[in-house]
Image (tube, rainbow, N blue to C red):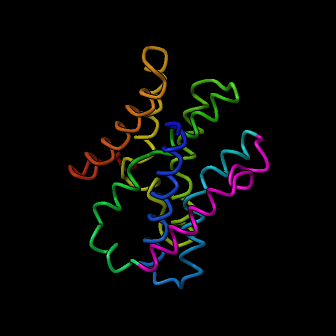
């Protein structure tokens, strides 16, 4: 089992739970919860794949993703009473930035330059949440003062700084840890970007 597979699996579960929880907070029905969970999990990756011309997009090529999303979303509906007691855990799910590294790797595989790879990683990591927030009639988190996309960009820079110095899989793990750490510190200490 490769590190990339584990990262993708954890990321899919994380974003699915994030989407399902947000939809349940808006009191959507079961179908609505599953749709929002699905869009949150695959939205960023779909936009990324379309941008690099990788069609049909990833979730259409491999049905394991949609199956994991559906099972996770349905489980979230049945265990919503328990999810409410794990708000911090759910925040960590949203903070992990696992998808950022998946998007970066797609850019590397397409032989794009480092800057474009980081943009693709940021889109992969953030835009499922953007679509979720738009559909739930919220101002997307990425456009508010919170440090969100910035963490993905910094994590991407760290990955490219390390990938030729150490094992690329370790570089991914360290980058993910930085993205997660930046998000947690930003929320804990109320660190925000300036508003113009």
Q: Is residue 113 magenta?
A: no
| Residue 134 on image: x %, y % | 55, 67
| Residue 114 on image: x %, y % | 58, 25
| Residue 168 on image: x %, y % | 49, 24
Front-lying residue, 191 or 162: 162
Left or right: 157 in relation to 81: right
Left or right: 155 in relation to 65: left
> Taking the image as drawn, is residue 175 in sight?
yes
Q: What's the magenta bit mostly, secondary-structure-wise?
A: helix
Residue plotted at (51% across, 47% down) = 125
Task: Please tell me whether residue 120 is drawn above or below residue 92 in the rendered image.
Answer: above
Left or right: 27 in relation to 44: left
Magenta-highlighted residues: 53-78
Left or right: 3 in relation to 114: left
Residue plotted at (54% across, 33% down) = 118
Front-lying residue, 136 or 93: 93
Q: Residue 131's quadrant in the figure? A: bottom right
| Residue 187 on image: x %, y % | 27, 52
Front-lying residue, 55 or 1: 1
Residue plotted at (69% across, 57% down) = 63
Task: Please tell me whether residue 30 is drawn above or below residue 108 in the rendered image.
Answer: below
> Taking the image as drawn, is residue 158 in sight?
no
Task: Please tell me whether residue 184 is drawn above or below residue 109 in the rendered image.
Answer: below
């Amino acid at each position: 089992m490769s590190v990339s597979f584990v990262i993708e699996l954890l990321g899919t579960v994380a974003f699915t739970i994030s989407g399902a929880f947000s939809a349940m907070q808006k009191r959507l029905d079961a179908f609505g919860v599953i749709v929002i969970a699905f869009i949150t999990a695959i939205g960023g990756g779909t936009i990324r794949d379309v941008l690099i011309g990788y069609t049909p997009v990833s979730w259409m090529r491999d049905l394991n993703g949609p199956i994991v999303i559906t099972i996770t979303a349905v489980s979230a509906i049945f265990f919503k009473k328990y999810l409410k007691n794990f708000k911090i855990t759910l925040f960590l799910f949203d903070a992990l930035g696992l998808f950022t590294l998946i998007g970066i790797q797609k850019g590397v595989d397409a032989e794009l330059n480092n800057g474009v790879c980081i943009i693709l990683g940021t889109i992969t990591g953030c835009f499922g949440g953007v679509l979720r927030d738009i559909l739930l009639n919220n101002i997307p988190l990425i456009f508010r003062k919170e440090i969100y996309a910035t963490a993905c960009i910094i994590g991407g820079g760290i990955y490219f700084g390390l990938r030729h110095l150490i094992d690329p899989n370790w570089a991914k793990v360290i980058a993910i840890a930085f993205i997660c750490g930046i998000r947690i510190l930003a929320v804990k200490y109320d660190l925000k970007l300036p508003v113009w």
